[in-house]
Amino acid sequence: MGVVGLAWLGLETDRSASRFPNAELVSRQSNYTSFPYRYRWDDAYLITDADFRTVYTWYSLQFGTGPERQANGRCILLESGQSNFLLERYNVITLCDNPQVGTRAYVQRLTSWR
């Protein structure tokens, strides 16, 4: 596997970190127009085999968001940002609870070079 293949595999592995275990992928959008300087991923998932509190806790721990930033009806907004000596990453997760369908998770991740 070449360098490009390894880079792509690394990106896909990183992207899959936003997927709750057994979540169904509903939609996925990538914006690589500024790649490699900046890229953005937008993913939506449906989670039917876990209650809302479990999903909320998992995303809070996975992205280090702490308590929710906002709540509106059955939806909450989680945000986090990380940076190291090379990259900055900003994460926005919206979780919406619908007892008849399940929990929907909308995950936006923006990564850029410092």
Image: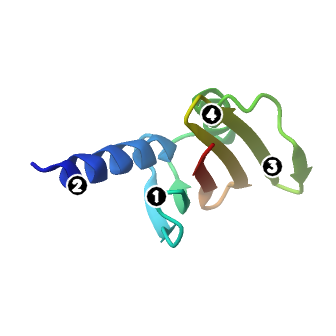
Which residue was labeled with disc 1?
A: 36
Residue at 63% x, 26% y: name it: 61
Place of residue 7 in the rendered image (x, y in percent of width and height, measured from the top left): 29, 48
Q: Amino acid at mark 3?
A: Ile
**Of labels 3 and 1, the one closer to you:** 1
Q: Amino acid at mark 1?
A: Pro
Place of residue 6 in the rendered image (x, y in percent of width and height, measured from the top left): 22, 46
Which residue was labeled with disc 2?
A: 4
**Of labels 4 and 2, the one closer to you:** 2
Q: Nearer the viewer, residue 34 or 11?
A: 34
Q: Are marks 4 and 1 in contact (CB under 8 Å)?
A: no
What distance separates the C-alpha of mark 3 from that of mark 1?
A: 31 Å
* Classed neighbour count for the residue bearing mark 4: other residues with Cα under 10 Å, few (<14), some (14–19), many (≥20): some
What distance separates the C-alpha of mark 4 from that of mark 2?
A: 27 Å
Residue at 71% x, 38% y: name it: 81
Which residue was labeled with disc 4?
A: 63
Residue at 82% x, 54% y: name it: 74
SS state under label 2: helix
SS state under label 4: helix
| In this picture, residue 22 sits left or right of residue 114 | left
Instruction: Indicate which disc, 3 or 4, sits on the residue closer to the N terminus.
Output: 4
Instruction: Indicate which disc, 2 or 3, sits on the residue closer to the N terminus.
Output: 2
SS state under label 3: strand
- Image quadrant of residue 68? top right
**Of labels 4 and 1, the one closer to you:** 1
Say if residue 34 shows up in the picture: yes
Which residue was labeled with disc 3?
A: 76
| In this picture, residue 62 sits left or right of residue 96 | left
* Classed neighbour count for the residue bearing mark 1: other residues with Cα under 10 Å, few (<14), some (14–19), many (≥20): few
Q: Amino acid at mark 2?
A: Val
- Image quadrant of residue 62? top right
| In this picture, residue 23 sits left or right of residue 60 | left
